[in-house]
Amino acid sequence: MKRALTLLAILLLCAGPALAQQQGGLPAVTVTNLPQGGQQWSVSLQVLLLMSAITLLPAALLAMTAFTRIIIVMALLRQALGTGATPSNQVLIGLSLFLTAFVMAPVLDRAWAAGIAPYLDGSLPLDAAFSAALEPFRGFMLANVRENDLMLFTRLAGVESWASPEEVRFPVLVAAFLTSELRTAFEIGFLLFVPFVVIDLVVASILMSMGMMMMSPMLVSAPFKILLFVLVDGWALVVGSLAASFKVAGT
């Protein structure tokens, strides 16, 4: 990926003289200060930055959205059920992605309206549009971050405290939010494990009392766990509870 980005940058820089001749001698990669404030970047530089940003989308999906909590809970649920690789990783990731899109829909709508749409209309420069598009994600993370985690990374950043939530540095907020999501996901996973562990203990006790110590309790308890999960409509409960566990600022 780094080689591809380097090659793209070289191609853009090499195409600069040709583009300059077509544009009346103007350089292809420029940053122009606007009279009303802000900066206007040339098309070549915008394309380069856009291609670089695309490579960061997976990291942004993991660190700034609901995806981390959802995928960890789904993986722990599959392990608690004892069904091995069923549902498969592709199914769990697909379900997690669509559930993440559902949870993040209000945030994405506000990011589009505040930053992306004005940039496409030409009413906002790239840097201002980027900052405006990040604000809804900042509000989402602030609404779901644990105060203890935020204070921990605040101290690690060498800051005593923040005068207001708007002054929290973005890297500090992302790190605290991701740590909070990991804790919350494991808390939910623990609660999901409890009833299935009880079933395993009951089945193991019955097998031992019957002298069937050579039979695996996991093999016998698996159908009962699946039956219990289906009877209580477990998938709907888990998905609905996960979607309701997030707070979206402004909604």
Image: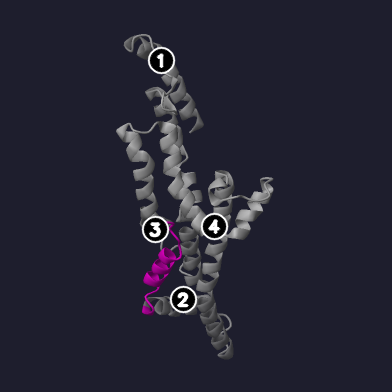
Q: Which residue is mark 3?
A: 103
Inspect the image, locate mark 1, and give the three-letter code of the amino acid beneath it: Gly
Is 238 in the magenta? yes
From the top left corner, tell me how far across and down residue 50 is, in percent.
41, 33
Inspect the image, locate mark 2, and give the three-letter code of the amino acid beneath it: Ala
Residue 216 at least partly seen: no
- As measured in the structure, the alpha-carbon distance from the residue carrying label 3 to the one carrying label 1 is 43 Å
Residue 222 is tagged as 2
From the top left corner, tell me how far across and down residue 117 is, in percent.
32, 39
- As measured in the structure, the alpha-carbon distance from the residue carrying label 3 to the one carrying label 2 is 32 Å
Looking at the rendered structure, the secondary structure element under dot 4 is loop
Q: Give neighbour class at mark 2: few <14, some 14-19, many 20+ (Cα, 10 Å).
A: some
From the top left corner, tell me how far across and down residue 147 is, in percent.
59, 59
Q: Which residue is mark 1?
A: 16
Name which residue lies at 57% across and 80% down. 214
Closer to us: mark 3 or mark 2?
A: 3
- As measured in the structure, the alpha-carbon distance from the residue carrying label 3 to the one carrying label 4 is 16 Å
Q: Give neighbour class at mark 1: few <14, some 14-19, many 20+ (Cα, 10 Å).
A: some
Q: Which residue is mark 4?
A: 145
Inspect the image, locate mark 4, and give the three-letter code of the amino acid beneath it: Val
Name which residue lies at 53% across and 48% down. 166
Q: Give neighbour class at mark 4: few <14, some 14-19, many 20+ (Cα, 10 Å).
A: many
Which label's residue is closer to the chain start, 4 or 1? 1
Asked which colour scheme the image uses, the reply is one colour
Which label's residue is closer to the chain start, 3 or 1? 1
Q: Are marks 2 and 1 in contact (CB under 8 Å)?
A: no
Which label's residue is closer to the chain start, 3 or 4? 3
Name which residue lies at 58% across and 90% down. 209
Which label's residue is closer to the chain start, 3 or 2? 3
- The residue segment tinted magenta is 231-251
Which label's residue is closer to the chain start, 2 or 1? 1
Q: Is residue 184 above or below residue 62?
A: below
